[in-house]
Amino acid sequence: MAFRLKLVPDQTSINFFRLQKYTFGLSAVLMVLSVILLLTMGLNFGIDFRGGTTIRTESTTDFVVSDYRDALTGLEIGDVSITEVFDPSFGEDRHVAQVRIGASEGTEAMTPDQIQTVEAALTEVDPNVSFVAVESVGPKVSSELIRTAVYAVLAASLGILFYIWIRFEWQFAVGGVVAIVHDVLLTMGIFAALQLRFDLSTIAALLTILGYSINDTVVVFDRLRENLIKFKNMPLVEVMNLSVNETLSRTIMTAVTTSIALFALFALGGDVIRGFVFAMLWGVLVGTYSSIYVAKNIVLWLGVKRDWSKPDPDKLPDQFTEQP
């Protein structure tokens, strides 16, 4: 006998609009709070955006981060951040650290002589240390990366807006774009609140979140369009509730299975992709929420054509609408 896992019953009749004032108010408050956090605390830009040098070290002996930091104090090399990297795949004799040195004002990334000075200072503290990777990004490249990242997110949003408009109606396009703006803003807000490192991998996560969120929303919109044709006399709110209930099982299963894979990557994937995976986990959570509670509320407020089996009279040429 085949076993079917069901996280949601086949038939549900949840009234998703019962708490619409609270859910919509919560979304508005979180979006405003995210903007305030971005303006006041700002993002903890990684070297990708800020410019500077990252040196990855490995040692066969355990080390103390404060000893590394003391060794670099007084070298006049800019802001220094030292992070010990933990990874389940590392052996007991493998101790890894990431030394991030931000570019000083008016300077490019560190010169080779400065890098050698840093390596010599760390070797004096830990003779077993080796330097496995050195990466530098100049301020000019950093500003170009920021501009390109903003363009990428805007272009993706406009492309999605155009696609939804063509496939459905402009009300759906507005609802879908508001939902993805909600998701991106809340993701950037939590990065500002927790001061997590914001780098190019986070931008990649934001673009992935856009795709995930709009895919979930389009599934609901597609069922809504079918039900608008099928139930012409049913109030719009009830048709929307029915559509979300009919797609709820698919929405929850997609979120849960995606989250399981992401949790595995977060625990076992290592420090390099941890920021990307965290952004994706948060994005799946808010994306699922927005596809249920944000996008369709916007469509309800804007109104929508009820009979999709007939052309919209407002779009017919005059010769077809005027009586002889």
Image (cartoon, helix red, strand yellow):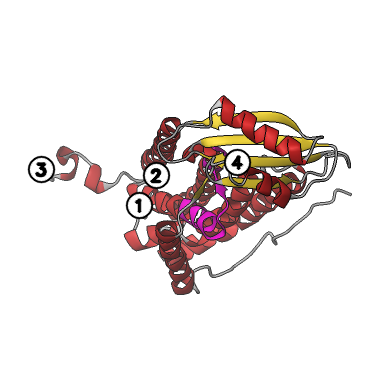
Say which amino acid is labelled 3. Pro
Distance Cα–Cα, label 3 vs label 1? 33 Å
Q: Earlier in the sequence, mark 2 or mark 3?
A: 2
The residue to which callout 4 is attached is: 100
The residue to which callout 1 is attached is: 171
Q: Are marks 2 and 1 in contact (CB under 8 Å)?
A: yes
For the stretch drawn in magenta, what is the main secondary structure?
helix
Residue farthest toward the left in the current orientation of the protein = 324
Q: Earlier in the sequence, mark 1 or mark 4?
A: 4
Distance Cα–Cα, label 2 vs label 1? 8 Å
The mark lying in front, picked from 4 and 2, is 4
The mark lying in front, picked from 4 and 3, is 4
Q: Quadrant of the C terminus?
A: top left
Residue 257 lies left or right of residue 33; in this view the side is right
The mark lying in front, picked from 2 and 3, is 2
Say which amino acid is labelled 2. Phe
Q: Which mark is residue 324?
A: 3
- Residue 146 magenta-highlighted: no
Residue 5 lies left or right of residue 159; in this view the side is right
Looking at the rendered structure, the secondary structure element under dot 1 is helix
Residue at image coords 36%, 42%? 165
Q: Which mark is residue 168?
A: 2
Query: Few, some or many C-alpha atoms within 10 Å of disc 4 (few <14, some 14-19, many ≥20)?
Result: many
Which range of residues does the magenta coloring cover? 184-203
Residue at image coords 49%, 53%? 188
Vertical placement of 50 versus 40: above or below? above
In terms of image quadrants, where is residue 152?
A: top left
